[in-house]
Image: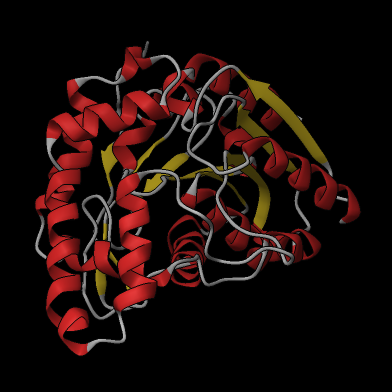
Amino acid sequence: MSAFAATPNSPWSFLGHQVYSVSSSPPPSPLDAYKKHGPAVLLVHGFGASTDHWRYNIPVLAKTYEVHAIDLLGFGRSAKPSELDYGGELWKEQVVAYVKERIKRPTVIVGNSLGGYAALAAGAALESDSAGVVLLNAAGYFSDEKFVSKPKNMSSRLRQMIGIGLSRDLLVKWFIYPLMQRLIFENLRRPGVIRSTLQQVYIDPTNVDDDLIESIRRPSLDPGAFQVFQKVFQARGLKGKPIDELFQELKAPLLLLWGDSDPWLRNAKAKQDKFRLFAREASLEVKEVLLKAGHCPHDEVPDLVNEEMLSWLKG
C-alpha cells in the first residue's frame, strides 16, 4: 500500500481558531489544463480521527486530483477550544468555509462517519461549489428518529444513565458526573483500549497498526481534548438537519460507500435502506457500493475504496 504523503498547508483559522489541513496535487503533466478545471477533493475524518486516517487514500487520489484533508475543530491537530458548541452545524460551517476560502472551486467532499454528516451538510450548503459528495458509513439521523439511541456497551449505558437519570442533582452534575466522564476518557485513550476498540470496528484488523493507534492517542493529550469529549457526548446528537432534509437540498451527485459489516452503527442495514429510500425520493444521482469491511472502509480496504472513488470521479 502507499504510504501517507501530504504537505501541511499554510495556517488557516475558522472562528478565530487554528485549523490543521494537508494537501497534495498531481505532478506537472500535459493534463494540467484538465486538472485545473476538474474538481478538487476534500476528505473529512470521523470521530476521534484526523487527516492521518486518509493515509492510504491521499497518495492514490492525488495522482489525478488536487486533494485536501482537514482536521475538524476539536480533533486531530486542530484547536480544541472549550467554548464552542460542537456538533454537525459547526463542522458543516467549517468545511464550507474551507472550500470557499482555501480551495476556491467546485469540490467533491468525502466524509466518514461523523465526517460523512459534515460532508453531506456542507455539500448541500455549497450548492454550485459542490461537485459531489461521497459518504463512507455516514453518521446522522432521519426526521422520524430521535437523537438518543439505546447504547450497546456498558460504558455507553453508564454515560446515558448518568446523563439522564442523575444530571438534575447539582452535586452529581458538577462533581460525580464530570469525574465519571474523566475516568471514561482516560480509559478510552489508553493505547490498549484504542487497539481493542479499532479491532472491533475493523472486520479485518490488518491495518490496525501502531501508527493508527498513535494518530488517535496523540490528539487526546492536547489541552482541551477532555472538554471536547465532554461536549460531544453531552450533546447526544449532531444537532443539524436530518439526512432526508439534506438530501432534498443536495444538488450534486452522491456516492454511497458502505462497509457492509459495520458493527459500530446501530441497525446498520436498516440505515442503509433509509439512505437508499430518501436519496431516491430526492431524485439524486446516486451510486451505491457495498464493501466487505467495517465502519472505516477507506482505511480497512483502501484499494477498493480508491478504485471506486476514482471510477466515480471520472464520471
Give me the residue at 34% from left, 71% from top.
163
Image side of residue 168 versus residue 143, left or right: left
Please state which of residues 207 and 17 is positioned toward the viewer in this rendering.
207
Residue 28 placement (x, y as % from top left): 45, 26
* 95 to 132, vertically: above or below: below
Image side of residue 263 versus residue 180, left or right: right
Please state which of residues 39 and 78 is positioned toward the viewer in this rendering.
78
Tell me, what colour scheme is on the image?
Answer: secondary structure
Quadrant of residue 197 in the image?
A: top left
Please state which of residues 185 and 130 is positioned toward the viewer in this rendering.
185
Q: Quadrant of the C terminus?
A: top right
Residue 85 placement (x, y as % from top left): 36, 77
* 38 to 30, vertically: above or below: below
Residue 56 placement (x, y as % from top left): 39, 23
Q: Quadrant of the N terminus?
A: top left
Give me the residue at 54% from left, 26% from top.
64
Give me the residue at 9% from left, 63% from top.
223
Residue 63 placement (x, y as % from top left): 48, 23
Residue 253 appearing in the image:
no
* 135 to 164, vertically: above or below: above
Give me the residue at 45% from left, 51% from top.
151
* 107 to 95, vertically: above or below: above
Residue 9 appearing in the image:
yes
Image side of residue 232 versus residue 76, left or right: right
